[in-house]
Amino acid sequence: MKVIFLDLDGTLLGENYSPEPAEPVIEELLARGYEVIINTSKTRSEVEYYLKSWDLEKPFIVENGSAVYIPENYFPREAIGEIGIPRGDYRIIELGRPYLEIKDALDELAPRYGLKYYGNSALEEVMAFTGLSRELAQLAMKREYSETVFRWKRAGFKRELETRGFRVIRGTRFLSVTGDTDKGKAAKALLAFYSLLGDVESYALGDGENDFPLFEVVENAFIVGNLSHPKAKHINSVEEFLEVIP
């Protein structure tokens, strides 16, 4: 069984965030027999938007490893037992901290450091910071486990957040604040379920520092863009990625 974790921003998605250019990539990976797992800093609402566009009904990981969403009855109960917390159409493995805990900490620090993030920004400001359309910006503001710091006036807030048990990690453009988790922890948790069903060969594709923990837990890691990682093979495009994997 081949399981592949895919980042969205800067990897599958371009500057206009359209799902259409990535659709052939998703279709090709499925045709080759991959379990395609989105592992992103985006929210559940954003990921659901893309999964619907791609007609992809798979588990997914949100907000930099803060939670794993598994469609109800996706895995056979007789093989792996009960999974996570039942909520709506999903079983959820929560690894991060509730959004309000993170927002409360940022609200306290914001006046001293000049912080701007989803929770203290108007919709129009979010659109300006991110380049998202109005529809996608509204989905991005539906946060459950993390915050994104768009702008700050002075340094020091990162250390204060870390002393309170939060993680601050750089994505493609912004800083993400989460609980004590990352994309690698979430991927490892999901891979444990797949391994109960048979042998697993794991892959990952990303572009940012927040993907580095993910690269550490898979067998075959690939990075696109300007960064480098000792475990990841550098590629120039998603199209090249399709050329170098089986």
Image (cartoon, rainbow, N blue to C red):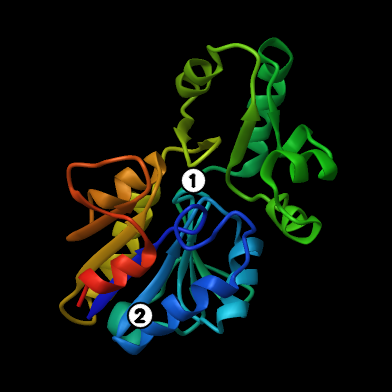
Q: Position of residue 16 (x, y in %)?
A: 64, 58
Mark 1 residue element: loop
Front one among 227 and 143: 227
Q: Residue at x 67, y 44 (%)?
A: 130
Which of the image's four quarters has the C terminus? bottom left
Residue 109 vs 229, above or below: the answer is above
State left or right for residue 65 relative to residue 112.
left
Residue type at mark 1? Gly
Foreground mark, 1 or 2, reads 2
Residue type at mark 2? Leu
Residue 32 vs 223, above or below: the answer is below
Report whether residue 76 is seen.
no
Residue 4 vs 105, above or below: the answer is below
- Category of crowding for the residue at label 2, using alpha-carbon neighbours closer than 10 angstroms: few (below 14), some (14–19), many (at least 20): some
Q: Position of residue 188 (x, y in %)?
A: 29, 58
Mark 2 residue element: helix
Q: Earlier in the sequence, mark 1 or mark 2?
A: 2
Q: Quadrant of residue 42?
A: bottom right
Q: Position of residue 117 (x, y in %)?
A: 69, 33
Q: Position of residue 37 (x, y in %)?
A: 41, 69
Q: Which residue is mark 1?
A: 96
Q: Quadrant of residue 204?
A: bottom left
Q: Residue at x 22, y 81 (%)?
A: 1
Front one among 160 and 229: 229
Q: Residue at x 52, y 16 (%)?
A: 160
Q: Which residue is mark 2?
A: 29
Q: Are marks 1 and 2 in contact (CB under 8 Å)?
A: no
State left or right for residue 221 relative to residue 147.
left
